[in-house]
Image (cartoon, rainbow, N blue to C red):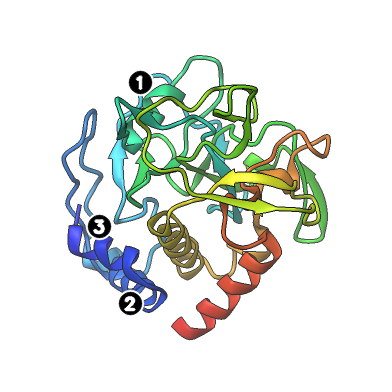
């Protein structure tokens, strides 16, 4: 993986825009990581074709997961933001995206998809290019191209951001996740963000905040997908899992883990994309 480009993605919005353009015109070697193979290199003559993998991603070789079908338009029409909801640390050290993808590589039918780790590195499983869909949203509903659609994962790519998500303090004063998993000792300083009221379908509460590097990489990924398929990928279809899960309230990601509401984030993406054109 081209570390210089990845570092640029992490620095600022200005560098994000520059990096998106560079990513479209460069073939990047794969980085060293467990269970990783190098994706097919793309010849310069194929640069006008839609890229099936995010060039700055480390490609993870899955064992059990399989694509469930092809996107109806040949490419993802949008993106669902998730958080992993686990503590993502072991012995006080941050795990990388390979750990999350390995955990999600199961036989139960759910599909691992893209993962962004704490440092902002993007990981993509080899079985799910941007042309194919897998299960990641569960029971869900969204209006896409003027039509109400269910099983939203058939239309939108999923991105898991490594983050415990919604937090609460237990009787012992310890932080724990929304489903009761206690954050262990030795975890780096917890950075939280609190909403005192609901934001549309997004739930109020105290959340573990995404890192700046994670959000920068998320923005770069969204801009990249739009540049690849401007007639297919829509920022209006960049949604939180909390916005599409049915029944309402079943999911809480990303909530306030993201520094903007989803409405604000979609508008931000549109404004940034105009600067690329």
Q: Locate residue 102, reporting x and y percent.
A: 37, 25
Q: Quadrant of residue 177?
A: top right
Distance from Cα at disc 1 to Cα at disc 3: 24 Å
Relative placement, left or right, of 168 versus 133 is right
Q: In front of the other: label 1 or label 2? A: 2
* Whether residue 115 is situated above or below residue 264 in the rendered picture: above
* Whether residue 195 is situated above or below residue 274 in the rendered picture: above
Upstream in sequence: badge 2 or badge 3: 2
Q: Which mark is residue 63?
A: 1
Of helix, strand and loop, which one carries label 1?
Answer: loop
> 188 or 46, which is in the foreground?
188
Relative placement, left or right, of 90 versus 237 is left
**Residue shown at the point (42%, 59%) measured from the top left:** 212
**Residue shown at the point (55%, 34%) measured from the top left:** 134
Distance from Cα at disc 1 to Cα at disc 2: 35 Å
Of helix, strand and loop, which one carries label 3?
Answer: loop
Instruction: Report whether residue 52 is seen.
Output: yes
**Residue shown at the point (45%, 82%) measured from the top left:** 276
């Amino acid at each position: 993986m081209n570390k210089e480009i990845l570092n640029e993605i992490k620095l600022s919005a200005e560098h994000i825009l520059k990096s998106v353009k560079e990513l479209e015109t460069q073939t990047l070697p794969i980085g060293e990581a467990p269970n990783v193979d190098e994706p097919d290199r793309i010849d310069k003559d194929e640069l006008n074709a839609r890229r099936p993998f995010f060039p700055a991603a480390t490609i993870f070789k899955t064992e059990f997961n399989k694509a469930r079908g092809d996107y109806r338009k040949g490419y993802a029409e949008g993106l669902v933001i998730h958080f992993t909801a686990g503590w993502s640390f072991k012995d006080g050290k941050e795990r990388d995206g390979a750990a999350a993808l390995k955990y999600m590589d199961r036989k139960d039918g759910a599909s691992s998809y893209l993962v962004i780790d704490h440092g902002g590195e993007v990981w993509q499983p080899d079985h799910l290019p941007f042309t194919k869909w897998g299960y990641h949203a569960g029971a869900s509903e969204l209006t896409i191209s003027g039509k109400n659609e269910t099983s939203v994962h058939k239309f939108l790519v999923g991105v898991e951001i490594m983050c415990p998500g919604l937090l609460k303090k237990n009787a012992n004063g310890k932080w724990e996740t929304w489903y009761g998993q206690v954050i262990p000792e030795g975890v780096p300083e917890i950075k939280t963000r609190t909403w005192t009221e609901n934001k549309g379908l997004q739930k109020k509460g105290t959340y573990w905040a995404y890192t700046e590097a994670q959000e920068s990489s998320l923005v770069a990924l969204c801009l990249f997908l739009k540049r690849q398929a401007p007639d297919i990928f829509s920022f209006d279809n960049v949604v939180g899992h909390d916005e599409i899960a049915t029944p309402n309230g079943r999911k809480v990601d990303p909530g306030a883990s993201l520094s903007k509401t989803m409405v604000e984030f979609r508008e931000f993406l549109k404004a940034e994309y105009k600067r690329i054109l």
